[in-house]
Amino acid sequence: MRFAPVHVSMRWPVMIGLGVCLALAAGGCQDEGVVRGEYSMTSSGGTLVMQCIDDDKAKLVSWQPKAGYTARVIVQGPSGQASLIFVSATAEDFRVAVHCVDARPRLEQFEEDDTG
């Protein structure tokens, strides 16, 4: 398992409170907490957008695999850690895990062993 380079950038700050969820309750809004920020991150297998919720929870909002890759979500969140795998039939697979520390995104990327 090897670490690979990643890119993290803040897409735009988002603030959603319980009042918004109450106002939208008829539309199926669930109280997942307060979104502290939404971030776009680029890994070796693709790009993802994630949110930090209540300072310490991560949620995958969307993902876009690079050409030749597909994405398989493991944990979408919100949870202590959200993760997905960018899978390729011809290149290394990459497992991406995101979490939040004090409402700041952290991303770890690992090459997955395709043998076995």
Image: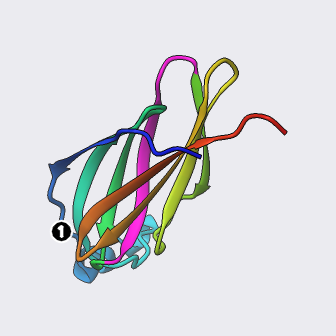
The residue most toward the right is: 116
SS at mark 1? loop
* Residue ID at (70%, 21%): 89
In this orientation, which residue lies closer to the viewer: 103 or 21? 103
The quarter of the picture where residue 41 lies is top left
Residue 53: image x %, image y %? 32, 72
Q: Which residue is identified by label 1?
A: 15
- Total tally of numbered discs in the picture: 1
In this orientation, which residue lies closer to the viewer: 34 or 112? 112
* Residue ID at (40%, 37%): 43
* Residue ID at (47%, 24%): 66
The C terminus is located in which quarter? top right
Residue 10: in magenta span = no
Direction from residue 17 to residue 57 in the image, left or right: right
Direction from residue 67 to residue 106 in the image, left or right: left
Residue 58: in magenta span = yes
Q: Is residue 6 above or below residue 88?
A: below
Task: Identify the main secondary structure in magenta.
Answer: strand
In this orientation, which residue lies closer to the viewer: 5 or 32? 5
Residue 104: image x %, image y %? 23, 66
